[in-house]
Image (spheres, rainbow, N blue to C red):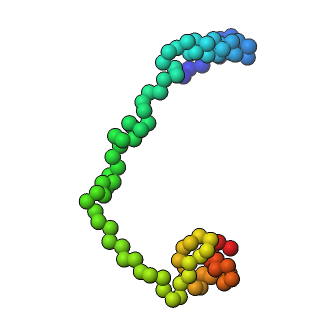
Amino acid sequence: MATDYDAPRKTEEDQSEESIEELKARRHDKNSGKVDEDETEAAESFELPGADLSHEELAVEVKPKQEDEFTCMSCFLVHHRSQLADADKIICRDCV
């Protein structure tokens, strides 16, 4: 954008008056407060690549807690005994 350096400069009062006038004009504009589109409708139309997993089956083998593992009483995750920080409270190193 070209700037005309010879043009008279506006004071802060002039600029604030113009902005107040613009705000007043926008207040009476009926479309200024409307949202262009509903977010939920827009989100439903998006389809991520590889997002349809309805035909996939998950095959996860769940093993019971082993003898060398413990369940942390703070985060309730199963850890190896080497991660035990407090044997009395049965808390892992991450939760200490």
Front residue (pair 17, 76): 76
How many numbered marks does the figure carry? 0
Residue at 59% of width from left, 76% of height from top?
Answer: 72
The quadrant in which the C terminus is found is bottom right
- Residue 50 x %, y %: 31, 55
Relative height, residue 62 to residue 47 (above, below)? below
* Residue 11 appears in view: no
Q: Position of residue 82 (x, y in %)?
A: 59, 85
Q: Which residue is at a point 48% across and 86% down the rendered structure image?
A: 66
Residue shown at the point (66%, 14%) measured from the top left: 20
The vertical placement of 66 against 42, above or below, is below
* Residue 85 x/y as whole percent: 66, 81
Q: Say whether residue 10 is left or right of residue 33.
A: right
Q: Can residue 46 be seen in this view?
A: yes
Residue that protrudes farthest toward the bottom in the picture? 67
Is 13 or 47 nearer to us in this picture?
A: 47
Residue 48 position (above or below residue 8): below
Residue 26 in percent (x, y) is at 56, 15
Q: Residue, x 66% and y 84% (percent of image)? A: 87
Q: Name the quarter where the N terminus is drawn.
A: top right
Quarter occupied by residue 58: bottom left
Q: Residue furthest left?
A: 55
Tell which of 21 and 89 is nearer to you.
89
Asked whether, in this view, residue 50 is left or right of residue 40, the answer is left
Q: Quarter-wise, where is residue 75 in the image? A: bottom right
Q: Nearer the viewer, residue 21 or 5?
A: 21
